[in-house]
Amino acid sequence: MRGWRDSDLWYSFTRSRITVVAAAIAGATVLAAFLAPVIAPYDPFDLASLDLLDAHIPPFWLEDGEARFPIGTDDQGRDLLSAILYGARISIGVGIASVLLSLFVGVGLGLVSGYAGGRVDAFIMRVADIQLSFPAILIALLVNGVLRGILPSERQDDLAIYVLVLSIGISGWVQYARTVRGSTLVEKNKEYVQAARLIGISSASIMLRHILPNAMGPVLVIATIHLAVAIITEATLSFLGIGVPPTEPSLGTLIRIGNDFLFSGEWWVTIFPGVTLAVLVLSVNLLGDWLRDALNPKLR
Amino acid sequence: MIAFTLRRLMQSVVVILFVALIAFSMFRFVGDPVHQMVGIETTLEQREALRERLGLNDPFHVQFARYIAKAAQLDFGISYQHKKPVTELLGARFPATFELAMVSALFALAVGVPMGVFTGLYRDSWLSKVFMAVSLAGISLPTFLIGILLIFIFSVTLGVMPSFGRGQTVDLGSWTTGLLTASGLQALVMPAITLGLFQMTLIMRLVRSEMLEVLRTDYIKFARARGLSNRAVHFGHALKNTLVPVITITGLQLGGIIAFAIITETVFQWPGMGLLFLQSIQTVDIPIMAAYLMLIAFLFVAINLAVDLLYYVVDPRLRLDRGAAW
Amino acid sequence: MPSTPSSADFVAAEAVARHFDVSKPWLSRTIEGSPRVFLKAVDGVSFSVAKGETLALVGESGCGKSTVARLVVGLYRPTSGRVLFDGLDLTGLPAAERTRIRRRMQMIFQDPYASLNPRWRVRDIVAEPLRAFELTKGRAEQDERVGDLLSQVGLSPADGEKYPHEFSGGQRQRISIARALSSNPEFLVCDEPTSALDVSVQAQILNLMRDLQEELGLTYLFISHNLAAVRHISDRVGVMYLGRIVEIADSETLFSAPRHPYTQMLLDAIPDLAMSGHVREPMGGEVPNPLDPPAGCHFHPRCPFANARCRAETPALKRYGSSEAACHAVEEGRI
C-alpha cells in the first residue's frame, strides 16, 4: 500500500498553487467557523449582552470606530466579527447537512434505480428529469414555502434550520442519483456481482457492499461542488427572508440585515459578511474543480 | 419522427400534470383554504356551507379535475393576501419580468459571445485570463451579492443609478413597458446585468470551449491551407459552428433566467412576478405559489420541447439512439 | 429421444430455453406497427453431466453458450424447460433448500478483471462464500481456510492482504478459483475461464483445474470457444450453433470423427502443424442475425450439404454410433 503522500492525488494537489491556497482559505474559514464559540470575542446570540448604545459602530479604522469591535457592529449592537464567525458556522453547517441529505437520498435512489431497473427505474428517473428541468433554487423555494404552510407558525423560527436543510437537500439529490445510477448500471453487469448473486447474497447487500464502494468516486466530486452551491442557496434563501431567523443569523441573514442600512452609509454590515461568503464559496468551488480534474484525467 | 414527437409530447403532458398535482395538493392540503377566506367570527355552520359551496367536500379526483379545468382557463383562484384573482395579479406583473428577462438574455449574448471568441482565439493573453477570472467569480458569487455590490458602488457611492423600481413606465393597453422612457431604461441596467451575469459567464465558457474544439478540427486546418485569412477562418467557419450549441443553451437558460429573476427582483424591488411569488412564500399565499409554479412549469416544458424537437430536426445523429429511455 | 437425460444424472438440462425481449418501446411499436422481438439466446437445449465428468460446450461467440452457463447455475430463469441438479429443480425450491444447493455449485467467470470486486481485499473476496453459507466460525478459522485455499490454487496465504489490482490476469483467475472452491462445491461451471489470458498462462490454469478435479472429485461444465483447451480438459463435448446443440459426443469421437458439417467446419479452422499442406476448407459465410435466424436448420445458409428439407425442417438430435448429431444430411446418409 502506498502512503497518501506518494499518491497521484497529493502530487497533483501540491502542483496546483491556486488549489493549495484555496484549500488553506477554505480550511481556515471552516475551522474558524466551528471554533466560533471559542475564538469569537462575544456571543451574538446572547440577546441580554447586547447594548443598543453599541449599535451602528463602524470599523475601528474609521472615525467613531472602537477597538472593542474591530469591524464594527450592526443595528442591534452585535459585534460584527463574532456575528460573522457564528454566521459562517450556521452557513457551513446547513451547507454540509444539506449536502449529506442530498447525498443519502440521491445515492440511495440511484442505486435502487440502477440495480432494480424496469418500472422502478423509469419512475425514479422520470421524477429526476422533471426536477432537473427546474433550477434548484426554485425547488428549494417551493419546498420551503410548502413546509412553512404545513408547520404551525409559532414553531417556524425554531424549526427554520431544519426546514432549510430539508429544502436545500431535496433540491439537490438528482445529480447524485443520475451519476450513481450510471455507475450502478455498469457495475451490476460485472461478473463479481454475478458471483455474489450466485451464492445468494441479498440485493441490498450487493448494492451496499459491492456496488456502492465502486460508485463513490464521482460522488465525492459532486459533493464538493454541491457544497458551494448549497452554501449559496442557504445564503440566498436567508437573504430572501425565508431562511434562518435574524436572532440566529447566517451569512445570508447578516447580508439581508445590512442591506437595509446600506443607504445610511453603514456599508460594513453588508460588505464584510458578503466578502466572507464570496471567499468561502470561491475557495470551495476551486477545490471542487481541482478534484474533478484530478480524478478524471480524461477531462484535462 | 412521429413516435419521437408523440413521446416527447406525452412526456410534457405528464410533467405538466405532475406539477399540477403538486400545485393542487399545495392548494388543497397546505393550510385550510376556508380558514384563509373567512373572518374569526364566522360560525362553524357558515364554514361548512362555504366548504360545500367551494366543492372542498368532493372526492379528490373530482377536485383535481376541476382544478385542471379551471387552470386551463387561466383561473387560479383568489389570492389570500391580496383578495384579488391570481391571474390578474400575475398578469399585471408579467411585463416587468418579461422585459427584464429578455434584456438580460440579450446582454448575456451580446457580451458573452465576443468574450468567448476572444478567450478562445487568444487563450494566453492577459485579457483572456482576466475574463476567465471574472467568469469564475460570476459563477461563484451569489446573484444577490452581485446586485448588492452594484447598488453599493453605483447607487450609494457614486449616486448615478437608481437602486430600486422600474422608473417611469408607459401603459400600452394591458402591457406596461419601461423601455420607452429614459428613467425606465436606466432602472433596467443594473437588474439586467445582475440577472444576466451568470448566463453571460456560461455562454462565454461555452463559446470558448467550442472555439477551441472547432479550431482543432481538420476542416479548419484545411480552410487555413486554402489560404483563407485568419478573419475568414475565425468568423466565417469557426464561430458559425459554435452558434448552434450557444443558441440552444441560451434557449434552455431562458427558463432559468425567469426563475432567478425572483432574487434579482427582490434585490432591486423590481415589481415583477418573482417578487410577488417571494412575498407569497413569506405569507404562505398558496394560490399565488401554485399558479406561479404552473406558469413556470409550462414555460420550462414548452422551451424544452421546442429545443428538443428543433435539435431532432437539425441533428440527424440524435435520431438513432433516442427512445430507449421511455 | 436418446439425449433425454435421466434424473440419475448429476446435472441435467431438459429442453431449456431462454428468450430475451429486445422489442422497441411500446409506443414506437404501436405507431410503426412493428411486432415484439425476442432474442432466442438458448432455444431448447438438453444435455446431462455425470458425476466427476467434464462436459464442454463450444461454439462461436453469440451462440448462447454463456447463457447456458448462467441458466445452469440459476443466474437466469429458463423461459421454458428446466435444469436439474442432483435430481432437484432449483426454481421450485424453498429458500433454505436453495441455499443448500447453491453451496454445492459454483462458477468461474471469463473476465478476471471484472469478476473480482476491485475495492475488496483478496481474503474478503475468497471468504465471501464462507460467510454467506456460514461455513466457518470466527475470524481465525476463516483466515486459516482462506490461506489454505490460496495455497491450494498456487498463491501464498499472505496474498490475502492484497487487492485484486496487484495481481496478473492468471493470478486473478486463481483467486477466482479459490473463491469458487471455498464452499466445497461438487460442480463448477467454468465460463471461458482461460479466454482472457495469455496463451502461456492458459495451460497453467487448465492444468490447475484438472489437478483440482482429480483431487476433489469435481464435476465441470466447461464453456469455451477454444477447441484446443476443450480437447485438453473435457470428457464429452457439445457443439452449439445459434442457441441449439448441433452435435454432442465424447471428446475422442468428436475430434476424430465429427459428424455435423458445422463441427467439421470448426475443426477445420484449427491451425494444425500435422495438417500443413492439407488444403483447408475456408470457414464459409457469417453467423446470421440471431434476432432473425434462418428457418429449418439454422446452419443451412453456410452448409455445403443443405437441401430443401434443411431449409424447412428443424433437425432433432439423433444417435449415430457413439455421437449424437442434429443434421438431415447425416440422417439421410448424404455425408
Image (spheres, rainbow, N blue to C red):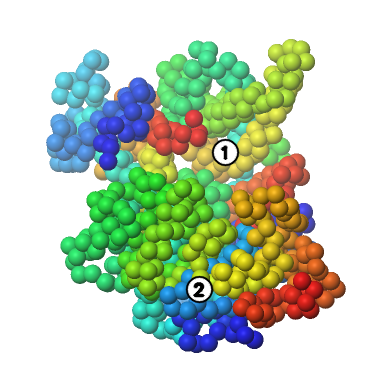
Q: Residue at x 70, y 13 (%)?
A: B230
Tell me how many marks there are: 2
Tell me the amino acid under the disc marked 1.
Answer: Ile
Question: Eyeballing the image, is C59 above or below B242?
Answer: below
Tell me the amino acid under the disc marked 2.
Answer: Val
Structural crowding at the residue carrying mark 1, measured as other residues with C-alpha within 10 Å and reported as few (<14), some (14–19) or many (≥20) = many
Quarter containing the C terminus of chain C: bottom right
In the image, is B226 to the left or to the right of A17?
A: right
In the image, is C306 to the left or to the right of C265?
A: right
Q: Position of residue A84 (x, y in %)?
A: 26, 33
Q: Does dot 2 land on a helix, a strand or a loop?
A: helix
CA separation in Å, label 2 and label 1: 58 Å
Q: Residue at x 65, y 53 (%)?
A: C275
Structural crowding at the residue carrying mark 2, measured as other residues with C-alpha within 10 Å and reported as few (<14), some (14–19) or many (≥20) = many
Q: Position of residue C266 (x, y in %)?
A: 66, 60
Question: Residue placed farthest to the right in the image?
Answer: C308
In the image, is C81 to the left or to the right of C37?
A: left
| For discs 2 and 1, the disc positioned in front in the rendered view | 2
Q: Position of residue C75 (x, y in %)?
A: 49, 70
Q: Residue at x 69, y 71 (%)?
A: C259
- Residue A202 or residue A103, whichever sits in front: A202
- Residue C271 or residue A124, whichever sits in front: C271
The disc at residue C301 is none
The disc at residue B257 is 1
Query: Which chain hosts label 2?
Result: C
Image quarter for residue B75? bottom right
- Residue C133 or residue A203, whichever sits in front: C133
- Residue C241 or residue A106, whichever sits in front: C241
The residue identified by callout 2 is: C72
Query: Which chain hosts label 1?
Result: B
Question: Eyeballing the image, is A105 above or below C14?
Answer: above
Q: Does dot 1 land on a helix, a strand or a loop?
A: helix
